[in-house]
Image (cartoon, rainbow, N blue to C red):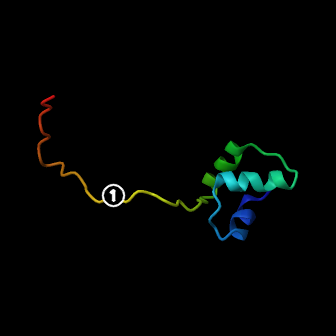
Amino acid sequence: MCSISIWKDNSCVYGARNIWHQPRREGLDAARFTVERLMRQMELKGVMRGKDVRTTRPNPQRPCPQNLV
């Protein structure tokens, strides 16, 4: 199993879960956490889709309002 070749073959968008599934389809068995650890060591990351957009940022210099409940 070479996760870097699987990652590159799939346009560098596969995350650990998809890379973990690919060798299983070919009959090889590996733990998903091992794939995650190897991807972290090789600095490989999958594409994140649907991430929320943060439109406001709190101002740390302004005081917090009192809790009136």
Image height of 9 relative to 3, above or below: below
- Report helix, strand or loop for mark 1: loop
Q: Percent position (x, y) of residue 3?
A: 73, 58
Q: Residue at x 13, y 49 (%)?
A: 61
State which quarter of the image contains the C terminus: top left
Image height of 13 relative to 56, above or below: below
Q: Nearer the viewer, residue 54 or 46?
A: 54
Q: Residue at x 11, y 43 (%)?
A: 63
Place residue 42 in its image quadrant: bottom right
Residue on which disc 1 sits:
54
Mark count? 1
Q: Percent position (x, y) of residue 18?
A: 69, 55
Q: Nearer the viewer, residue 24 or 38?
A: 24
Q: Residue at x 26, y 57 (%)?
A: 56
Q: Percent position (x, y) of residue 17?
A: 67, 51
User: From this viewpoint, which residue is outermost toward the top?
Assistant: 69
User: From this viewpoint, which residue is outermost toward the right?
Assistant: 27
